[in-house]
Structure formats: structure tokens, C-alpha cells
Image: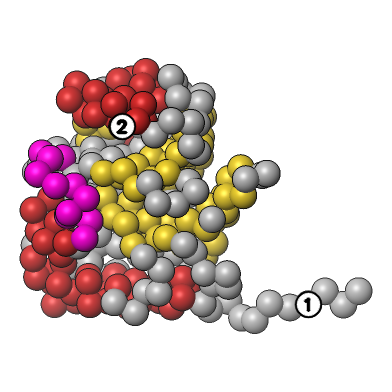
Amino acid sequence: MLIAQISDLHIQRDGKPAYGVVDTVTMLKKAVETLNALDPQPDVVLATGDLVERGSAEEYAILTEILKPLKAPLLVVPGNHDARGPLAKAFPEIGKRVGDSEFFHYAVDEFPVRLIGYDTTVPKHHHGEVCAARAEWLDRTLAAGGDKPTMIFLHHPPFRTRIAVMDKSGLANSDRMAAVVAKYPNVERILCGHIHRSIQARFAGTIASVAPSTAHQIAMDIRDDAPLCFNMDPPGFQLHAWAPDNGIVSYTAAIGDYGEPIKFPW
Ligand SMILES: [Fe+2]
Ligand SMILES: [Fe+2]
């Protein structure tokens, strides 16, 4: 099973460049082209939040139009820039999975790897939260899945990334998540976004990771007093490849045209 992950698309209304300089629309179109060119094709694409900039229906309409040519099925979770209601309307099939839950949570059982979309957002705030109700939901949902290999995908990483300003808008009460995840050794990965950069850390006995953005990246500045800056490092995506005899192997790849593969001469 192949699981592609994109994150932090930040689509703006009227296709306006984000922060005046980042053409997120064109960059997402390139991401879709890159994913569509993968051979073999991913079985599913996960988008780990910040799909649009302000959570408006107009932005989601632009987003779904750009995503239309994507060949693989798509699953999404909200980030701090999204809004649950308009998101569910833009992706009605996923909205059905969520049902009338207060949170945009759902489990997908139809693949060899179980996928759990987990909503960490706090409306109108940049940080995320694992409240008692969400910890309880995760525990119940993991218990219901038996020992099938499982990935949890969410927006806010549950670990300190050391990109100081981003950690201030990190995942509050992530220790609640750690206590739940530690009970389930079949949680193979916790896949996140929010930090716009490829990062991995050990967390609660599993591997937690952040995917790069399809648009701008957050500067890799881990000084305690670093200001929050973005840069135009190559955008990217991740591919998580599962096989029954090999578990999951994860790759980070750049989006963009860097020329044809060059065969070694020997
Ligand atoms: Fe973001
Ligand atoms: Fe975010």
C-alpha cells in the first residue's frame, strides 16, 4: 500500500499569492502533477491541514477545482487555517465519515493500513489541542481497530520541533495523546503538518513526522529567539510505502522539475 502525504497548501481566494509572494495555486497544481506522475500510483493521498488560508467556502471551491485532476483518492484533516463546516461541505464524502461529531475525526478501514484522521484544531486559534474528549475518542477508535497497522494523520505535531514560534502554537496537552498512543504498538506513524518542513521525532513509542508544505517552507532556524520566517526551499511531499513483510518506509521528495533521472554509467 502506498500513502502519499501533502500538507499546508494554503490556497487563497482569487488565487492571490499568499503573503504577497507565494503562488500557492500554481504550486499545488505542480504537486498534483507530481503525484499523478508517480508510478506506481499511491492508493490514497492524505492532506494534513491548512488546505486554505482563511477557511472560506470560496477558497475551498478553488481548492477542490485544483484537486479535481488528482487520480488517487484524497483524505483531509483540518489545520488552524481551515474551518470544519466549509471543509465538510467541500469534501462531502469525508464529511459523511465525520458524521455529526463535533470534531473532524474519522477512521478509514478499507485499506491494509488503517488510517485515522484526527482533528486537533481549536476554532479561531493557531494552536491545537488534545482535550479529554479527543483523547477518549482516540483511545476508543484505536481499541476498535484491533492490531491492524495504523497511521494517525493530523495537523499539529505532538512533539516540540524547536522552531520556537511554531512550538508556541503547537499541540496543547499532547501528553494525553502520548498516553493513549503508548498503549497501541500497532500505531506505525503519526503524520503531521503545520511546520512546513520535513521533521521526524520519536513519540510515545512510535514515529511522528511532519511533511513539507506544497508551497512555502518555514525557515530551519532552531535558535530559541529566532523570528518566524518562511523561505522558498523546494516544496515537497512524502510517500509512505507499506508492505506486510517490511512495515512502513517513508520518503520525502521535492516537487518541481529537476530534470530527468540520469542513469549511472556502470
Ligand atoms: Fe500551514
Ligand atoms: Fe498550521
Amino acid under disc 1? Lys
Quadrant (top left, top right, bottom left, bottom right) of the C terminus: bottom right
Image quadrant assignment for residue 213:
bottom left
Q: Secondary structure at mark 2?
A: helix
Disc 1 and disc 2: Cα gap in Å? 47 Å
Bounds of the magenta segment: 93-103
Query: In percent of the image, x 8 and y 65: which residue is there?
Result: 57
Taking depth in this image into account, of 257 and 229 the one nearest to the observer is: 257
Quadrant (top left, top right, bottom left, bottom right) of the N terminus: bottom right
Q: Which mark is residue 263?
A: 1
Which badge, 1 or 2, is on the more N-terminal residue? 2
Tell me the residue that label 2 is attached to.
141
- The answer to whether 177 is drawn above or below residue 45 in the figure is above
Q: How many marks?
A: 2
Taking depth in this image into account, of 265 and 184 the one nearest to the observer is: 184
Q: Is residue 88 left or right of residue 253?
A: left
Residue 116 position in % (x across, y down): 34, 42
